[in-house]
Amino acid sequence: MEQRLFDDFKKPEPKAWQNQIIKELKGKSIEELNWKIAGVEGKPFYTEEDLPDSLPQLQSPNQQAEALGIRNWVNYQVIKVDSEKEANEKALLALNNGATGILFQLIAVPNFDMLLKDVLLNYCQIGFEIENGAESLMNAFEAYVKAKGINENEVRGFICSNESPFLSKLPNFRFFLSEEKNENASLGLALLLAKTIDVIDTNTTTIEEVQAWFKQLQFNLNVGESYFLEIARHRALRILVAQLANSYGFELALNVIQISSSSGQWNEPTKDEYNYLLRATTEAMTAIIGGTDAVIIQPFHQLFPKNTAQGERIARNISTILKDESYLDKTLDPSAGSYYIESLTAQLVEKSWGILQQIEEKGGLKNLSENDINALAL
């Protein structure tokens, strides 16, 4: 039987919502409900009229949807390497229990035969974090891949270092480029883009080289606590990177852009460790809904100093819970079309791009002092 239940209701108009709010405020100004956080301005309610003129399709279905879900992200387990043998045992345990990537924290070039023993590089992703000696590390890793006869196209991951960025010979291995934490959301994104421009302009002379660099950079966001803003920041970054590539004269597919998301450390004067576990979970959730390609949650060693394995397991299981219990891998882009989030995303894109233009007009990031940078957000 055909039902037309919604025919009995009129479509709500923005003016009607506004009038009702004014009535409920009992004489107070509706402008008092406007808000501002991290440099982003907001209203008390949003309607279809607040949607941008065009809504980009920010996510593409996973090519292995049957095995990995329509929406897939890499679940990185962070492992500090003091002993290659022990780190290898931890990595295998993690990969057999929910992790799909391993981030090794190193102080020197390791023995890869020991560190990666029985690790199937074509079925997981690998990250390396090292303060100094990054190129030597990559040379050794590339030699290991070649010696083992592994298809270099199937090796995926990134290297994180304080040294100058460089390209790996492995086409799908990226250099980790992270944002600096900033209280102003738009300024933070603009600074990451400005850093990208400095890297590319320093290392390229041809459009082919520019394209290669864009495809081998891993953009990282440090996830904050503002739930909807973090979703919008992730969405805005993907648009902004594509927009930046376009300014160099070529079109960069959105699914080529790789974004990772790092949770914060537990550094609050509270004894309630479970509160932090919940916070880390909501941070991961915002990143996933925002379209991240990888989640990096630091192990909770400070919370469980007598049982480090528990701290690692809990960090690893957050992604598992969000997949298997919250079903976030079943929906491609759950925030698409949201009046509020789409509006925030568009605002971040516009403001961040405007700040980036100011930075470039002043000669680039390298020519700005800290005071100059802070003034950009005003």
Image (cartoon, helix red, strand yellow):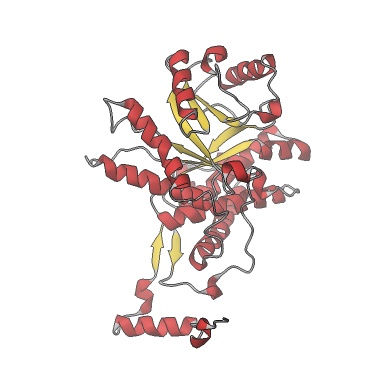
In which quadrant is the N terminus drawn? bottom right
Vertical side of 159 occupied by 28: above or below: below
Hey, which residue is sitting farthest left in the picture?
Answer: 271
Q: Answer left or right for 96 relative to 29.
A: right
* Visible residue check, residue 186: no
Report if residue 131 is visible in the image: yes
Q: What's the residue at 39%, 66% (across, down)?
A: 35
The quadrant of the rendering that contains the C terminus is bottom left
Query: Vertically, is 5 above or below 32?
Result: below
In the image, taking residue 276 as reference, residue 129 lies left or right, namely right
Residue 33 percent location from the top left of the image: 36, 72
Residue 190 drawn at (x, y percent): 55, 49
Q: Residue at x 66, y 49 (%)?
A: 254
In the rendered structure, the answer to whether residue 94 lies left or right of residue 113 reads left
User: Image quadrant of residue 124?
Assistant: top right
**Is 162 located above or below residue 287 in the figure?**
above
Residue toward you, 48 or 345: 48
Residue 94: image x %, image y %? Answer: 46, 28
Q: Residue at image x 56%, y 18%?
A: 118
Q: How many marks?
A: 0
Residue 121 sits in quarter: top right
Find residue 225 and report its horizontal and vertical position in percent: 38, 50
Q: Between residues 315 and 81, which one lies in front from this camera angle?
A: 315
Q: Nearer the viewer, residue 352 or 330?
A: 330
The residue depicted at 53 percent of the width and 58 percent of the height is: 334
